[in-house]
């Protein structure tokens, strides 16, 4: 009963605050994940089709971003970005400190880290494509954009889905690290509630359960997408 009171939507309950914080967690993870998808596609293209300097830069990007701690990337974006913005404002004649919004810094940090992993997933998915299909598309006169839209993109998407699903789960967990910037996401809200009520075990347990629920729902969505992708390539047979 005490746990239900903590989760209630009454004046003394933390239910609304936790749900709001959970929505912030999902929002920052989604923004970072989508940004990572764009970055990953560009980096994968650089590794597959770029010249030697482009491939070198793409390899360096994935090596560095996969090799340093995610928390360090968040610190660099938040504090380094705030210093850069403050410097620009000071050059314009304005004084004082200008901080980067924690949501933007967190989403950008998740995006650049996620992009390094998504690039490898996209590159691996492209490698398993049947070269004959690409050559057949070129033989019938498809331009590069049509070839990408009708042959390459659907198959890369289908092969990449399992790996992309895992990277989404990673982005979701990384969102908890953004609490160090002051963003009131799920973990930060659990910390606030635990400090206010002196019930840390209960609120951290609740936060863990909410994360598991979001994870389970995410797995169901990606499983549905994988089934649809297989159905589209098997004439309706799964």
Image (cartoon, rainbow, N blue to C red):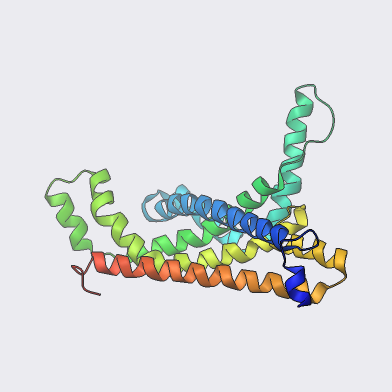
- Quadrant of the image occupied by residue 130: bottom left
Residue furthest to the top: 93
Horizontal side of residue 183 vs 53, given as left or right: right
- Quadrant of the image occupied by residue 160: bottom left
Q: Residue at x 51, y 57 (%)?
A: 59
Q: Quadrant of the N terminus?
A: bottom right
What is the number of callouts on the image?
0
Q: Residue at x 50, y 69 (%)?
A: 217
Horizontal side of residue 232 vs 80, given as left or right: left
Residue 221 seen in render: yes
**x and y, in percent, of residue 183 in the image:** 73, 52
Image height check: is 190 above or below 37? below
Q: Quadrant of the C terminus?
A: bottom left
**x and y, in percent, of residue 100 in the image:** 72, 42
* Closer to us: 91 or 200: 200
* Closer to us: 55 or 174: 174
Horizontal side of residue 132 vs 178, given as left or right: left
Residue furthest to the left: 140
Residue 128 seen in render: no
Q: Residue at x 44, y 66 (%)?
A: 221
Horizontal side of residue 193 vs 43, given as left or right: right
**x and y, in percent, of residue 138 in the image:** 17, 50
* Closer to us: 3 or 123: 3
Q: Residue at x 54, y 55 (%)?
A: 30
- Quadrant of the image occupied by residue 124: bottom left
């Amino acid at each position: 009963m005490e746990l239900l009171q903590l989760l209630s939507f009454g004046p003394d309950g933390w239910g609304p605050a936790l749900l709001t914080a959970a929505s912030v967690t999902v929002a920052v993870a989604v923004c970072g994940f989508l940004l990572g998808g764009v970055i990953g596609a560009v980096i994968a293209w650089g590794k597959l089709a770029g010249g030697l300097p482009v491939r070198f830069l793409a390899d360096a990007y994935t090596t560095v971003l996969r090799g340093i701690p995610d928390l360090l990337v968040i610190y660099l974006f938040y504090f380094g970005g705030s210093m850069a913005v403050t410097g620009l404002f000071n050059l314009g004649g304005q004084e004082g400190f200008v901080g980067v919004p924690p949501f933007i810094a967190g989403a950008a940090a998740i995006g650049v880290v996620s992009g390094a992993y998504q690039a490898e997933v996209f590159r691996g998915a492209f490698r398993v494509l049947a070269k004959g299909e690409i050559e057949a598309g070129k033989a019938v006169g498809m331009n590069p954009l049509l070839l990408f839209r009708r042959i390459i993109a659907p198959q890369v998407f289908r092969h990449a889905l399992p790996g992309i699903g895992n990277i989404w789960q990673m982005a979701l967990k990384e969102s908890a690290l953004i609490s160090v910037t002051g963003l009131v996401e799920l973990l930060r809200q659990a910390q606030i509630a635990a400090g206010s009520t002196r019930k840390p075990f209960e609120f951290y347990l609740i936060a863990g359960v909410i994360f598991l629920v979001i994870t389970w729902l995410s797995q169901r969505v990606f499983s549905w997408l994988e089934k649809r992708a297989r159905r589209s390539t098997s004439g309706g047979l799964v």
